[in-house]
Image (spheres, grey):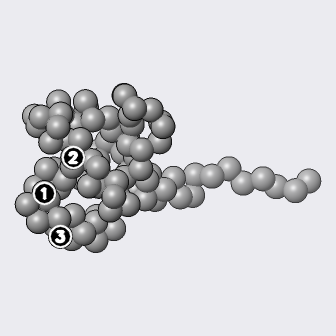
Amino acid sequence: MFERHRKTIQALGKSASSALRIHDLLKERVILSLGNAEEGLNLSFLTVAKAMANLERLGIVKEFTGKQRHRLFSYHSYLDLLGQGTETSRSSH
């Protein structure tokens, strides 16, 4: 999955560099704010915002707060993968 997403991001051309750096950070932090990415990668807020918008457009991340400010993004397919097998099963008694 990581390699498939990496190849998709590389197709962005010159915009790929910062998006790839965010992608790498998302492997460590499945949920990320723009501010956390800005601090963690030492990139400008605008660069992070544009890169995250590209990742969202590609379907790699999803914004899930619905807010204009302090938005959070999840690497949803990785989060789903991490959660597999952890669902509680209900037995019918």
Q: CA distance from mark 1 to mark 3?
A: 9 Å
Q: Which residue is mark 3?
A: 11
Q: Amino acid at mark 2?
A: Lys
> Which of these two is toward me, 84 or 46?
46
**Mark 3 residue type:** Ala
Report helix, strand or loop for mark 2. helix
Residue 72 position in % (x across, y down): 39, 37
Residue 32: x and y, percent? 33, 38
User: In this rendering, is residue 67 above or below 16?
Assistant: above
Marks 2/1 in contact by CB < 8 Å: the verdict is yes
Disc 2 and disc 1: Cα gap in Å? Answer: 9 Å
* Mark 2 or 3: the one toward you: 2
Say which quarter of the image contains residue 11: bottom left
Quadrant of the frame with the N terminus: bottom left
The local crowd at label 2, few if under 14, some if 14 to 19, many if 20 or more residues have their Cα within 10 Å, is: some
Residue highlighted by disc 2: 50
Counting residues from the start of the chain, the first of labels 2 and 3 encountered is 3
Q: Which mark is residue 15?
A: 1
Res 25 visible: no
- Residue appearing at x 28%, y 66% in the figure: 5
Task: Determine the residue positioned at 58% across, 52% down.
Answer: 86
> Considering the numbered disc 1 on the image, is that residue within a helix, a strand or a loop?
helix
- In which quadrant of the rendered view does residue 33 lie? top left
Kindly give the residue lying farthest to the front in the view shown: 68
